[in-house]
């Protein structure tokens, strides 16, 4: 039976470390979160981010804008936040209403305040391995692996999913740790066979029960990034948890695995941004 990688406990430990670091800084890191519209899930995420900031001593500003907010109004707010000395990190909650272009919005955020690491400058830095920030969810996955004592070097890793937010950066981070990485997606031929080669399998497809036991090698490490609802409305991941846990050596649960790490890595990125902007080594 697999060892459970407890994201709640690991996240708690990291947040304690962040709080100590923040308390010792000569400035107070500041994060601005912008929410446009009334998406219920996004509103919950924003509330959780604000609470997490308070817990570790980070200054937080939350801007809740109406659904009909214009392009000019949103870009104007971002321009103000770019210049604000109290703000070191800017996060615009996605998805945005249809009339707003997420790429334009991401491009408007100063790269050194882009704590989501979505700006092309930061994406390029991740590609070459000389990065300031990492996207929060892939960074959280790497911390879970590292703090569980799992070595990545020389391992065969398979990432299911090729999104710009998780799949692609996740593959690059594993590659930077000297793994051999395969990225799978909806057009992959023989997906189950490819997955069965994985020493470390990361699933980020957003389909409940997608990864079944016959897709997993005996003793593999299985990281479930999926956040889905089953037929009873309960939160679940991409992985058929009970069946896969019987074969895997390590596994992340949903909830309580990767999820808690995402906001924790956002806090870490905000502290990094504050130190860089403030010239603190």
Image (cartoon, rainbow, N blue to C red):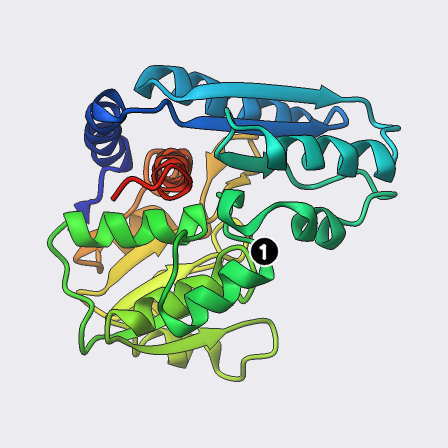
In the image, taking residue 109 as reference, residue 15 lies left or right, namely left
Q: Nearer the viewer, residue 172 or 253?
A: 172
93 shown above or below 38: below
Mark 1 neighbour class, 10 Å CA radius: few under 14, some 14 to 19, many 20 or more: many
The residue sitting at the left extreme is: 149
Residue located beneath label 1 in the image: 119
- Residue 203, horizontal then vertical, whole percent: 43, 59
The residue sitting at the front extreme is: 279
* Quadrant occupied by the C terminus: top left
Can see residue 206? yes
87 shown above or below 55: below
Q: Nearer the viewer, residue 77 or 183?
A: 77
Q: Residue at x 56, y 36 (%)?
A: 90
Q: Residue at x 35, y 77 (%)?
A: 181
Q: How many marks?
A: 1
- Residue 159, horizontal then vertical, whole percent: 41, 67
Q: Nearer the viewer, residue 213 or 77?
A: 77
210 shown above or below 191: above
In the image, taking residue 233 as reference, residue 130 lies left or right, namely left
Q: Residue at x 41, y 51 (%)?
A: 133
Splitting the image into 4 quarters, where does residue 59 fall?
top left
Q: Residue at x 39, y 35 (%)?
A: 274
- Residue 95, horizontal then vertical, whole percent: 69, 41
The local secondary structure at tag 1 comes to: loop
Can see residue 251? no
- Residue 215, horizontal then vertical, whole percent: 37, 69
Splitting the image into 4 quarters, where does residue 120 fall?
bottom right
In the image, taking residue 92 as reference, residue 20 lies left or right, namely left
The residue sitting at the bottom extreme is: 189
């Amino acid at each position: 039976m697999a060892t459970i990688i407890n994201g709640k406990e690991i996240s708690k430990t990291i947040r304690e470390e962040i709080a100590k670091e923040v308390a010792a800084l000569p400035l107070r890191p500041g994060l601005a979160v912008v929410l446009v519209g009334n998406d219920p899930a996004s509103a919950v995420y924003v509330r959780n981010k604000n609470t997490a900031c308070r817990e570790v001593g980070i200054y937080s500003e939350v801007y809740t804008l109406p659904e009909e907010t214009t392009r000019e109004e949103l870009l104007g707010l971002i321009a103000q936040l770019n210049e604000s000395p109290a703000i070191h990190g800017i996060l615009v909650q996605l998805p945005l209403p249809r009339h707003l272009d997420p790429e334009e919005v991401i491009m408007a955020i100063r790269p050194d305040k882009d704590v989501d690491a979505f700006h092309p400058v930061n994406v390029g830095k991740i590609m070459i391995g000389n990065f300031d920030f990492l996207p929060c969810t892939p960074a959280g996955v790497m911390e879970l692996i590292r703090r569980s004592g799992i070595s990545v070097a020389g391992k065969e890793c398979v990432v299911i999913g090729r999104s710009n937010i998780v799949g692609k950066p996740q593959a690059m981070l594993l590659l930077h740790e000297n793994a051999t990485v395969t990225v799978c997606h909806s057009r992959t031929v023989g997906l189950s066979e490819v997955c069965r080669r994985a020493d470390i399998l990361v699933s980020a497809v957003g389909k409940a029960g997608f990864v079944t036991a016959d897709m997993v090698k005996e003793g593999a490490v299985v990281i479930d990034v999926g956040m889905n609802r089953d037929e009873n409305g309960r939160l679940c991941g991409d992985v058929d948890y009970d069946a896969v846990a019987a074969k895997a050596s390590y596994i992340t649960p949903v909830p309580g695995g990767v999820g808690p790490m995402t906001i924790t890595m956002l806090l870490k990125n905000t502290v990094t941004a504050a130190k860089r902007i403030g010239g603190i080594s």
